[in-house]
Image (spheres, rainbow, N blue to C red):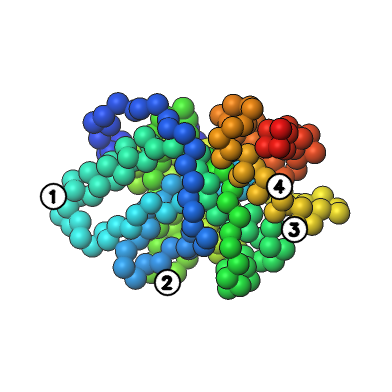
């Protein structure tokens, strides 16, 4: 009832393999807002454990003008399905430059942070699937070039449309995810007395913990705990000691 399914994507040609370990994206810049000059961005949805915001992760670009007619339509569906299968077999938790975390840890708006040239903090982000599906849903901006983005589902099971937050950072407007059963639309706000430096410490500590080879606690359990306690920024006082002890013991 609340999810749309684009059944034009063919079934996976290969079995879904066990998920590999955590991967790290070492970009120091945020995922760019959609640019339409060369093509339209093909994206999936990711959720940050630190701030619990949802954002778009750009996977590729697609020029819809190249896929005309019946043969073009078939080729486009194959293009979508190939990306869906590839990304669904990849790591489901990635360290990315979450747009809202950049705002929180820099103490400034996203656009100001982006213009300032500061390095990004890297946040654990989970690639989202919906409705019990194992394949990630893919989205393309179908809006008019230069106009308001109109992100629509093109492959998989997920919200039929999604909206961007007005910060123009790639962060999603949370209420647009209600159709997928995500009812908690609250936005994390730092408690009184919590500084941007404090939040940066949490982000950097978590990154170090999950990439420490000799960690005494199973890293898989630690990142599961991080998502169970999201937004981790708000619950660090409850679980921070466990992460810190895993790093320094």
Q: Earlier in the sequence, mark 3 or mark 1?
A: 1
**Is there a contact, CB below 8 Å, between mark 3 and mark 1?**
no
Q: Closer to the observer: label 3 or label 2?
A: 3
Distance from disc 3 to disc 1, alpha carbons, whole Å, reads 53 Å
* Residue carrying label 3: 196
Q: Position of residue 130 (x, y in %)?
A: 48, 34
* Residue carrying label 1: 71
Residue drawn at point x = 44 percent, y = 58 percent: 150
Q: Secondary structure at mark 3?
A: helix
**Is there a contact, CB below 8 Å, between mark 2 and mark 4?**
no
Residue drawn at point x = 30 percent, y = 57 percent: 62
Q: Earlier in the sequence, mark 4 or mark 1?
A: 1
- Residue 202's tag is 4
| Mark 4 Cα-neighbour bin, 10 Å: few <14, some 14–19, many ≥20 | many
Side of 16 where 71 appears, left or right: left
Side of 109 where 73 appears, left or right: left
Q: Closer to the observer: label 2 or label 4?
A: 4
Distance from disc 3 to disc 4, alpha carbons, whole Å, reads 10 Å
Q: Quadrant of residue 121?
A: bottom right
| Mark 2 Cα-neighbour bin, 10 Å: few <14, some 14–19, many ≥20 | few
Q: Position of residue 225 (x, y in %)?
A: 65, 31
Q: Earlier in the sequence, mark 3 or mark 4?
A: 3
Q: Earlier in the sequence, mark 1 or mark 2?
A: 1
Distance from disc 3 to disc 2, alpha carbons, whole Å, reads 34 Å
* Residue carrying label 2: 146
């Amino acid at each position: 009832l609340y999810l749309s399914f684009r059944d034009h994507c063919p079934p996976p040609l290969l079995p879904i393999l066990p998920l590999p370990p955590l991967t790290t994206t070492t970009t120091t810049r945020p995922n760019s807002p959609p640019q339409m000059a060369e093509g339209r961005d093909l994206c999936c949805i990711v959720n940050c454990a630190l701030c619990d915001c949802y954002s778009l992760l750009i996977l590729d670009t697609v020029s819809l003008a190249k896929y005309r007619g019946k043969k073009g339509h078939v080729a486009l569906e194959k293009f979508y399905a190939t990306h869906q299968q590839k990304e669904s077999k990849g790591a489901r938790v990635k360290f990315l430059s979450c747009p809202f975390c950049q705002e929180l840890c820099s103490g400034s708006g996203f656009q100001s942070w982006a213009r300032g040239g500061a390095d990004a903090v890297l946040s654990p982000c989970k690639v989202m699937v919906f409705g019990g599906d194992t394949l990630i849903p893919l989205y393309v901006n179908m809006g008019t070039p230069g106009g308001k983005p109109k992100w629509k589902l093109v492959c998989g099971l997920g919200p039929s449309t999604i909206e961007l937050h007005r910060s123009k950072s790639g962060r999603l407007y949370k209420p647009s995810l209600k159709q997928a059963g995500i009812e908690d639309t609250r936005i994390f706000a730092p408690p009184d007395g919590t500084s941007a430096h404090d939040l940066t410490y949490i982000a950097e500590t978590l990154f170090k913990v999950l990439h420490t080879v000799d960690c005494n606690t199973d890293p898989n359990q630690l990142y599961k705990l991080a998502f169970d306690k999201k937004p981790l920024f708000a619950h660090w006082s409850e679980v921070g000691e466990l992460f810190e002890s895993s790093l320094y013991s």
